[in-house]
Image (cartoon, helix red, strand yellow):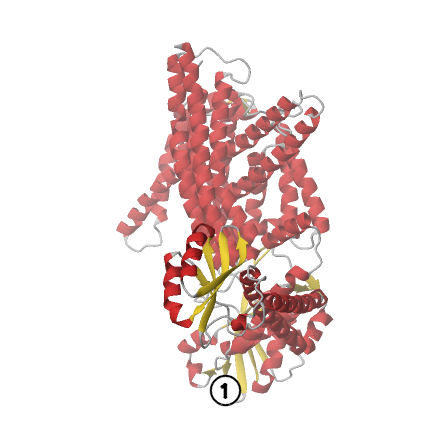
C-alpha cells in the first residue's frame, strides 16, 4: 500500500499540471486564432493582441505550481517520504480543485479574451479595459490554486 | 494634483473670421468644442441662431486614403534597422503609441507640398496596377510556354494545323500505354501520324487525315482517351519560333518591372513627408468637421466649449488680435457635467497610466491616482517577489528611457516597480529563484510551508488596510475638502468604526486577534500591553461599540430619503455591504499565489539548468543558456500577470470604495496627429 500512496500522490500532481496546461493550451490557441484574424486586418495592433493572447496562459502555471507543492510535500525533490494509501488519497482530493476548476476557468477566460480582442479591434484606445475584463475570470483559478495549496499544506505526513 | 476645474467658454466672432479663429484654437488646443445642437434645443437663443451646416468631409477622406496608400506601399522600401531590433521596437511602439518628432516649420510648410505628394501617391497606385497587369500577363505566357514546350520539334507551323480544303490535321497526346493500339487503328484510316515527342507517360502525335474521316478520327481519340491540343488562333509560327518570341516578351516584361521597382527605393525617402502630410490633412479635416458644431447668424458665429480654468488667460491672449471677437467664460451650472482631466504632481504622473486604464472619475469625485500609487508598487512587488527580476526591470527601464523617446511615464513606472521588487525580493530571499541561496530576511513562502500561511495573513492584512481603511479614508479626505462634514461623519467615520469593531469581535472570537501581527511582524505587544490580553479586555466594550455604531449607520445611511420606511430599509440594506468586504479581502490572497508562481518557476529553471552542468564540455554553456531563456520567459509572463492583477485589485476592490469612474475625458480641439508630434 505504501507504493500506491506515492503513486496516487504523483498522479494527482501530474493531473493537476496536465489539466491546467490543457486548459491553458486550448484557450491560448483559440485566442491566438482571433488574434491572427485581428492582426491581418490591422498589423499595428499586434502588440496588444499578443498581450491578450498570453492572458489565459497563467492557469497552466498554476497547475505547475500545484504539482510543485505536492512534490515539496511528498519530498520528491530529495528523498520521497513514506506515504500510506490514505495520504495519497488525501493529496488527490486536495488537488481536485486544480484538476477541475482551473482548466474550465482557463477555457472561459480564453473566450472572454476573444471578445476583448473584438473590443480592441473596434476601439484600440480602450485596451486597458480589455485587459482587465478577462482577469476577473482568473479570480477563480487563483482561488482554486489557493484551496489546493492550503489543503495540501494541511496534510500531515 | 487632482481633477482640474473647468469653465464653460463662449466665443463670439464675425462669420468671415470663423476659419482663422478655429485655426488659432486648434493650434492652441485648450478648448473642447461642444456641439451647439443640444444647448440650442433648450435655449431661447434658438430663435436667433441657426446651426452651421454640416460640411461633408469626403474629399478629405479620399485624400487621406490616398496618402495612407502611399504610406503603406512605401513601408517595405525603407532602410531596415535590423530585423530583431526593428520587431521589438515596433512591438513597443504599438503598445506605447510612439510618434516621431517634427518641427513646427516643417509641419506648416507641408501644406504647400500637398498636391505634389498626392500626385506621388497616385503614381504609386498606377505602378501597382501596372505591376499586377504585368504579373497576370507573365503567368499567361508561362502557361503557354509549358504547353508549347512539348511540341517544339514540330516542323510545321501552328497556322497550318487544323482544317483545310481536303484534310484535317491536329496535335494530340495519348497515354503511352495506349499508343500502340491507337497507332494501329489510325493506320487503318486514310491518315498519317507522326510522333513528335515522348514525355514521361505520354506520346505526343501529329495526325493528319482526310477530311471526311474527321469524325471517325475523333471517335478513335475518344476511345483511347487521347486529347487534342488546341492553341490560340493568333499563334502562327512553328512552336520553336513562338517559344523564342515568348521568351523575348518575358525578358522585356522583366526589364520593365525591374526598372519600375528600381524607382521605388528612391521614392521611399518621401515617406517621411507623406506621414507629415497625413497629419496635416487630418488636422484640416478635424477643423472643417468642427464647423458643424458652431452656431451662426448671418454675420456672426458662436462657439461653445469647455476649457480648463487655468488656461483661460492663454486663450484670451491668443485671440487678442481679433479685436471684435468676444470671449465669455462662466463656471459650470449644477445641471452640466464638465469633462474631466487629471493633472498630477510629477511623482504621481507615471501612475496616471494605470488610472487611464480604468477611466476617468466623475467631475464631482476625487482623483484616485495618488492613492493607488504606493499600493500599486507594493502589490506589484509582492506578485513578482524576486530581487534579480527587480534589478532586470530597473536596468531595462533605464535603457529604454535613453533609447525610446516616447512612453517616459511607462518606463518610470517600470523603474519604480523594479525598485520595490528588489526590496521585497531581498526580504523574501529570492534572487533569480534560489540561484545564490539567499536567506530570507523576513519570510520565504516557497521554502518553508509555515511561511506560506504567514504570507497569506500578510496579504489579507493588506486587503483589510486598503479596503476598510484607505478606501473610506480617501472618501473622507474628499468630503472634508468639500466641507461635507455631515457626510464625512456618518458615511465614513461611523462606518469604519463599525467595520473595525466587527472585525475585532470576529478575530477575538476565533482567537486570531494579534495572530497576524505576531506571525507576520513578530509583534506580541503594543505599548507594553500583550495583544492577546488586550483583545480579551476590550472584547466586551467592542460589542457595545459595534451595536452603537451599527444603529447610527442604519439610521443615517438612508438620510437622503424623505420617508422613514425607506430610510430604514436603506440603512438595513447597507449592513449587507459588510459581507461584500469578505470577498474583497479574500481577493488579496492572489498576491500570495502570484508571488509563489514566480518563485516556483524560477526554482525549476534553476534545477533544470543545474542538471546539465555535469555534461562534459558543453555543460556550463547549456546551463547558462537555460538560465537566460528560462528566467527571461518567467520574467515576461510574471510581469504581465503582476501588472494585470495588481491593476485589477486597485480597480475592483479599491476604487469602488470611493469613486464611480463615470467621467468623460477632456478631448480638446487640437491638431490630433496620428504619426508625428510637433516638438
In the displayed structure, B414 sits above or below B541; it is below
Task: Look at the numbered disc 1 and give the secondary structure of its residue.
Answer: loop
Chain bearing mark 1: B
Left or right, residue A93 beside residue B514 = left
Q: Residue at x 42, y 33 (%)?
A: A143
Q: Locate residue B254, reporting x and y percent.
A: 66, 66
Position in image of residue B20 (x %, y %): 62, 80
B482 and A121: which is toward the camera:
A121
Instruction: Tell me the crowding category of disc 1: few under 14, some 14 to 19, or many 20 or more residues within 10 angstroms, Cα based.
Output: some
Q: Position of residue B617 (x, y in %)?
A: 72, 23
Residue at left 41%, top 20%? A91
In the displayed orientation, state which residue is furthest to the left: B565
Which image quarter holds the C terminus of chain B?
bottom right
Q: Is residue B543 above or below residue B84?
A: above
Q: Quadrant of the N terminus of chain B?
A: bottom right
**In the image, is residue B291 above or below residue B434?**
below
Determine the image quadrant of residue B504: top left
Front residue (pair B166, B669): B166
Considering depth in this image, is B463 or B266 the residue closer to the camera? B266
Q: Residue at position x 67%, y 47% from top?
A: B84
In percent of width and height, residue B322 lies at 64, 82
Which residue position holds label 1? B297
Circle count: 1
Q: Residue at x 60, y 71 (%)?
A: B130
Residue farthest to the bottom, as pictured: B298
Which image quadrant is residue B376 in?
Answer: top right
Q: Along the horizontal axis of the image, is B150 left or right of B610?
A: left
Q: Nearer the viewer, residue A32 or B606?
A: A32
Task: Determine if residue B406 is in view.
Answer: yes
Amino acid at each position: 500500500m505504501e507504493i500506491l500512496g506515492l503513486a496516487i500522490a504523483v498522479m494527482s500532481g501530474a493531473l493537476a499540471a496536465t489539466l491546467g496546461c490543457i486548459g491553458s493550451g486550448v484557450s491560448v490557441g483559440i485566442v491566438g486564432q482571433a488574434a491572427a484574424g485581428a492582426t491581418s486586418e490591422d498589423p499595428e495592433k499586434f502588440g496588444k493582441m499578443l498581450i491578450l493572447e498570453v492572458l489565459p496562459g497563467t492557469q497552466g502555471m498554476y497547475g505547475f505550481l500545484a504539482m510543485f507543492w505536492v512534490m515539496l510535500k511528498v519530498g520528491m525533490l530529495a528523498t520521497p517520504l513514506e506515504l500510506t494509501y490514505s495520504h495519497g488519497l488525501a493529496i488527490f482530493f486536495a488537488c481536485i480543485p486544480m484538476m477541475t476548476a482551473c482548466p474550465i476557468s482557463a477555457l472561459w477566460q480564453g473566450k472572454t479574451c476573444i471578445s476583448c480582442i473584438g473590443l480592441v479591434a473596434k476601439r484600440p484606445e480602450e485596451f486597458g479595459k480589455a485587459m482587465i475584463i478577462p482577469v476577473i475570470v482568473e479570480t477563480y483559478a487563483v482561488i482554486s490554486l489557493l484551496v489546493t495549496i492550503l489543503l495540501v499544506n494541511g496534510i500531515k505526513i | 494634483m487632482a481633477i482640474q476645474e473647468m469653465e464653460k467658454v463662449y466665443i463670439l466672432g464675425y462669420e468671415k473670421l470663423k476659419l482663422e479663429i478655429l485655426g488659432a484654437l486648434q493650434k492652441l488646443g485648450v478648448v473642447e468644442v461642444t456641439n451647439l445642437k443640444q444647448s440650442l434645443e433648450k435655449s431661447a437663443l434658438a430663435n436667433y441662431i441657426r446651426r452651421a451646416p454640416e460640411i461633408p468631409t469626403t474629399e478629405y477622406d479620399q485624400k487621406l486614403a490616398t496618402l495612407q496608400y502611399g504610406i503603406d506601399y512605401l513601408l517595405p522600401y525603407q532602410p531596415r534597422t535590423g530585423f530583431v531590433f526593428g520587431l521589438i521596437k515596433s512591438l513597443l511602439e504599438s503598445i506605447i503609441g510612439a510618434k516621431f518628432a517634427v518641427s513646427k516649420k516643417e509641419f506648416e510648410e507641408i501644406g504647400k507640398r500637398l498636391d505634389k505628394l498626392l500626385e506621388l501617391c497616385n503614381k504609386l497606385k498606377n505602378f501597382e496596377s501596372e505591376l499586377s497587369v504585368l504579373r497576370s500577363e507573365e503567368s499567361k505566357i508561362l502557361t503557354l510556354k509549358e504547353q508549347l514546350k512539348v511540341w517544339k520539334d514540330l516542323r510545321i507551323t501552328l497556322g497550318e494545323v487544323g482544317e483545310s480544303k481536303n484534310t484535317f490535321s491536329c496535335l494530340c497526346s495519348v497515354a503511352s500505354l495506349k499508343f500502340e493500339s491507337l497507332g494501329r487503328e489510325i493506320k487503318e484510316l486514310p491518315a498519317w501520324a507522326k510522333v513528335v515527342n515522348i514525355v514521361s507517360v505520354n506520346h505526343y502525335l501529329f495526325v493528319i487525315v482526310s477530311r471526311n474521316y474527321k469524325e471517325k478520327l475523333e471517335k478513335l481519340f475518344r476511345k483511347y482517351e487521347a486529347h487534342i491540343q488546341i492553341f490560340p488562333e493568333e499563334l502562327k509560327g512553328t512552336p520553336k519560333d513562338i517559344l523564342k518570341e515568348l521568351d523575348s516578351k518575358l525578358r522585356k516584361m522583366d526589364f520593365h518591372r525591374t526598372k519600375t521597382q528600381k524607382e521605388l527605393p528612391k521614392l521611399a525617402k518621401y515617406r517621411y513627408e507623406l506621414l507629415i502630410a497625413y497629419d496635416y490633412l487630418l488636422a484640416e479635416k478635424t477643423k472643417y468637421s468642427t464647423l458643424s458644431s458652431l452656431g451662426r447668424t448671418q454675420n456672426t458665429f458662436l462657439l461653445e466649449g469647455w476649457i480648463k480654468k487655468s488656461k483661460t488667460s492663454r486663450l484670451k491672449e491668443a485671440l487678442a488680435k481679433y479685436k471684435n471677437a468676444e470671449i465669455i467664460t462662466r463656471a459650470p451650472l449644477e445641471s452640466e457635467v464638465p469633462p474631466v482631466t487629471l493633472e498630477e504632481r510629477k511623482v504621481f504622473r507615471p501612475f496616471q497610466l494605470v488610472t487611464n486604464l480604468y477611466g476617468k472619475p466623475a467631475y464631482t469625485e476625487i482623483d484616485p491616482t495618488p492613492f493607488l500609487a504606493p499600493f500599486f508598487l507594493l502589490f506589484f512587488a509582492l506578485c513578482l517577489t524576486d530581487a534579480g527580476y527587480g534589478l532586470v526591470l530597473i536596468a531595462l527601464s533605464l535603457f529604454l528611457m535613453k533609447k525610446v523617446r516616447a512612453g517616459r511615464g511607462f518606463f518610470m513606472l517600470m523603474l519604480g516597480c523594479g525598485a520595490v521588487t528588489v526590496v521585497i525580493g531581498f526580504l523574501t530571499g529570492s534572487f533569480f529563484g534560489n540561484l545564490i541561496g539567499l536567506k530570507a530576511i523576513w519570510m520565504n513562502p516557497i521554502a518553508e510551508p509555515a511561511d506560506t500561511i504567514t504570507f497569506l495573513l500578510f496579504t489579507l492584512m493588506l486587503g483589510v488596510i486598503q479596503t476598510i481603511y484607505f478606501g473610506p479614508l480617501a472618501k473622507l479626505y474628499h468630503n472634508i475638502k468639500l466641507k461635507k462634514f455631515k457626510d464625512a461623519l456618518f458615511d465614513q467615520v461611523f462606518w469604519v468604526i463599525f467595520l473595525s469593531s466587527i472585525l475585532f469581535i470576529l478575530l477575538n472570537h476565533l482567537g486570531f486577534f494579534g495572530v497576524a501581527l505576531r506571525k507576520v511582524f513578530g509583534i506580541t505587544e503594543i505599548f507594553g500591553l500583550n495583544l492577546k490580553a488586550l483583545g480579551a479586555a476590550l472584547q466586551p466594550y467592542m460589542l457595545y461599540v459595534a451595536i452603537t455604531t451599527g444603529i447610527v449607520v442604519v439610521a443615517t445611511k438612508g438620510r437622503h430619503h424623505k420617508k422613514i420606511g425607506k430610510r430604514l430599509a436603506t440603512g438595513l440594506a447597507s449592513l449587507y455591504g459588510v459581507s461584500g468586504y469578505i470577498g474583497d479581502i479574500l481577493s488579496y490572497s492572489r498576491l500570495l499565489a502570484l508571488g509563489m508562481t514566480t518563485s516556483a518557476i524560477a526554482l525549476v529553471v534553476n534545477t533544470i539548468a543545474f542538471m546539465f552542468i555535469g555534461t562534459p564540455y558543453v555543460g556550463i554553456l547549456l546551463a547558462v543558456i537555460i538560465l537566460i531563456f528560462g528566467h527571461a520567459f518567467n520574467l515576461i509572463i510574471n510581469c504581465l500577470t503582476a501588472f494585470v492583477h495588481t491593476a485589477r485589485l486597485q480597480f475592483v476592490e479599491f476604487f469602488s470604495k470611493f469613486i464611480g469612474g463615470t467621467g468623460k475625458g477632456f478631448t480638446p480641439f487640437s491638431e490630433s496627429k496620428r504619426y508625428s508630434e510637433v516638438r
